[in-house]
Amino acid sequence: MIVFFAAIAGAVVGAFLARKRGGKRLDVLQYTFIYAVAFALLGLFATILVHRLSL
């Protein structure tokens, strides 16, 4: 679940940053996708860390 929430949070952050910087529709989509992937990757590492430490 951490991965999904992180991906959604990344998409929101990416879209916000692209709009703030005056990006067009494709810029917003690119930022949304890239930030969602990056945050999901961080969420994956967080999930692995939580599972490893909970034993």
Image (cartoon, grey):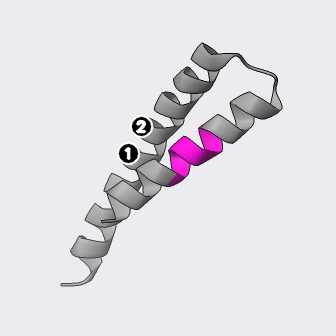
The percent position of residue 52, horizontal first and vertical second, equals 23, 72
* Snapshot quadrant of residue 18: top right
Q: Are marks 1 and 2 in contact (CB under 8 Å)?
A: yes
Dot label at residue 41: 1
Q: Nearer the viewer, residue 41 or 5?
A: 5
Marker disc for residue 32: none
Q: Say what amino acid the circle numbered 1 marks.
A: Leu
Q: Which residue is mark 2?
A: 37
Q: Residue furthest left?
A: 55
Stretch of the chain drawn in magenta: 9-14
Depth order, front residue of 52/3: 3
Secondary structure, mark 1, is: helix
x, y percentage for residue 16? 70, 40
Residue 48 position within the rendered picture, expressed as x and y whole percent measured from the top left: 26, 63
Magenta span has 36?
no
Image quarter where the N terminus lies is bottom left
Relative to 47, residue 30 above or below: above
**x and y, in percent, of residue 50 in the image:** 31, 73
